[in-house]
Image (cartoon, helix red, strand yellow):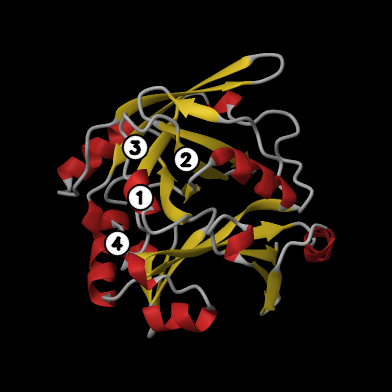
Amino acid sequence: MAAKVGRVDHPVVAVHQLEPTRVQYKKLGFVVPPTGYHREWGTANVCIMFAEDYLEIRGVGDPHKFLAGLDKFLVHGEGLCGVAFNSRNADESYAEAIATGVGIELPKHLNRQLVLEDKTLDLHFKTVMLAHDLYPGLTHANLCEHLTPEALRQPGWLDHPNGVISFGRLVGVVRDFDAAQAAYTRLLGAHNVKREADRIFLDFGEGADVELIAPEEAERRGDAQPVRGDYMAAATLLVKDIATTEKWFADNAIRYRQVDGQLAVAPADACGAHLYFQQA
């Protein structure tokens, strides 16, 4: 891979207010940890954890500090706003990208603190921003190296009542398949980019894959958001038992529709995110 890009680490959902979102995602059947704050930035978040990846829900903590484009995204509403790919070593990823001519920024250290009942978690990581033309269809993408992985997941945080265990797929919308194929070949290497007649698949060797589709297909699926241009349209979460998930939704008045064996939750019930739940 041209920039030593690892698996999907965490997709991101942008929201206006974190506290109502916490309530709603608990209603969806997730264990929702306390809110954390990026000390160097103006963003705050809650991170819903799975064994190998997680969902970050991001809001504004301090509007006077750097918001990493969150405020601009929210002008058009809440929803999936990007993805972080894992990097085992951010400095090595940066060096490799520079050596191969991939557009990338210097790694930046970030610190996020979460106050629990019995302790404060002091989480550290490095983030590496990628040039915008490298990730068509994903809205925003960066690399993330976790420096304190042992503290990231706490007891009980993986035991979601809805049965979710991981992400299975992210879906992005692109208007130019040729340009998208060229961009991801530069970023990931040709062997990780598989083009079909009407879509492109990105394979990371483990974890969730990425499917890139045309705007017309997003419209057919009910996931179109044309105001965003090229964008991340949807995400699929894998569950232990789809019948248990469906019962949880029904018992908690979560609106959903059945699509090819998946449960597609109404975006209004997922704070703007188009989320699908599928049997693992």
Give the camera-side residue of 267 and 149. 267
| First reached walking from the N terminus: tag 2 or tag 4 | 2
**Tag 4: Cα neighbours inside 10 Å, few (<14), some, or many (≥20)?**
many
Discs 2/4, front: 2
Give the camera-side residue of 244 and 181. 244
Q: Quadrant of the C terminus?
A: bottom right
**Tag 3: Cα neighbours inside 10 Å, few (<14), some, or many (≥20)?**
many
The residue identified by callout 3 is 67
The percent coordinates of residue 135 (x first, y second) are 31, 58
On screen, 205 above or below 195?
A: above
Amino acid found under the numbered disc labelled 1: Ala
Give the camera-side residue of 99 and 134. 134
On screen, 7 above or below 110?
A: below
The percent coordinates of residue 167 (x first, y second) are 59, 55
Discs 3/4, front: 3
Amino acid found under the numbered disc labelled 4: Tyr
- How far is mark 1 from mark 2, CA to CA? 17 Å
- How far is mark 3 from mark 2, CA to CA? 9 Å
The reply to whether residue 196 is visible in this rendering is no
The residue identified by callout 2 is 59
Q: In this view, does 228 lie to the left or right of 249?
A: left
The kind of secondary structure element at disc 3 is loop
The residue identified by callout 4 is 184
Residue at image point 71% right, 18% down: 117
| First reached walking from the N terminus: tag 1 or tag 2 | 2
- How far is mark 1 from mark 3, CA to CA? 15 Å
Amino acid found under the numbered disc labelled 2: Gly
